[in-house]
Amino acid sequence: MQRIICLIMGYALGLIQTGYLVGRAKGIDIRDYGSKNAGTTNVLRTMGKKYGALVLLGDALKCIVAVLLVKLIFGKGFGDIICLLALYASAGVILGHNFPFYMNFKGGKGIAATLGMALSYCFLIKHGILVTLIGFGMFLVIFLITNYVSLGSIVGYITLFVTIIVFGLKGAYGFPSGSNRALLTEYFIIFGLLTFMAIYRHKENIKRLLAGNERKTYLKGKPEIKIDDDK
């Protein structure tokens, strides 16, 4: 029951579509521009760095808030499985972000929300800061070398998954010894499904990468549309 509650709570938070809301605040529907996606990368390309950073922050915060709520609600009674419950809440956020029911289930790709999940590890698990640095660091390295957000996201996600397995096997999650193997297996399956979903959501990007015509993203690039900051 706790897992279901965490999943539903996360999904509700994930429905807060930061990219869509920021676009609407400036008089546009971000889904009508660029890649037609409501995520951070499309906002960055379409509206510029300031709005891209705002959406990145908002989408990451959704996962952080979800994890904090899990700790607040279940921390005392279910402290030994709090990492697993936090993962269910994070999965709910990513599902809500990717598949918002009120937007015909067409949201983002969940990368910014996953960054929030990774950041939550800093205060949730043993060696959490290192886990986050490895995953995000790999994304950053790939992106800065290639300027492909999609490639950085895919490689970063896979790296995070591998790191999660390695540290999990070293006892980073504090699961009770008697059920450690079963809980770890459940944890790895859930994270594996999130990793698969992230890769699948990038299937068109992968096709373009293989064809050599994937679009690059430059931090110093100009936004595609002019935004009236006086609005």
Image (cartoon, grey):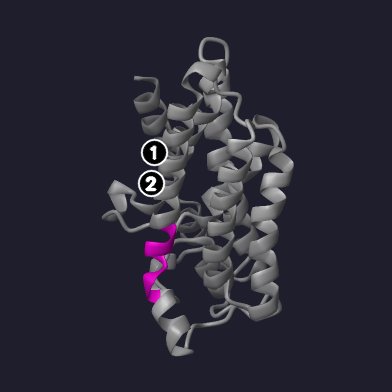
Query: Disc 2 designates what residue?
Result: 95
Task: Name the residue that disc number 1 marks.
Answer: 11
Assign the magenta stretch its main secondary structure. Answer: helix
Q: Find residue 140 and report its horizontal and vertical position in percent.
A: 68, 65
- Amino acid type of disc 2? Leu
Task: Classify 54 as above or below 120.
Answer: below
Q: Which residue is found at the position 43% from the left and 58% from the top? A: 198
Query: Which stretch appears magenta?
Result: 198-204
Looking at the image, residue 142 lies above or below residue 134? below
Give 168 or 12, whichever is nearer the viewer: 168
Instruction: Tell me, yes or no, whether the highlighted magenta stretch contains residue 138.
Output: no
Among the two numbered marks 1 and 2 on one chain, the one whose residue lies closer to the N terminus: 1
Q: Residue at x 33, y 51 (%)?
A: 99
Marking on residue 94: none
- Is the residue under label 2 in contact with that under label 1 (CB below 8 Å)? yes
Question: Looking at the picture, how far across and down is residue 160, in whole percent?
Answer: 58, 52
Q: Is residue 199 magenta?
A: yes
**As drawn, 134 above or below 173:** below
Looking at the rendered structure, the kind of residue marked 1 is Tyr
Residue at left 64%, top 54%?
135
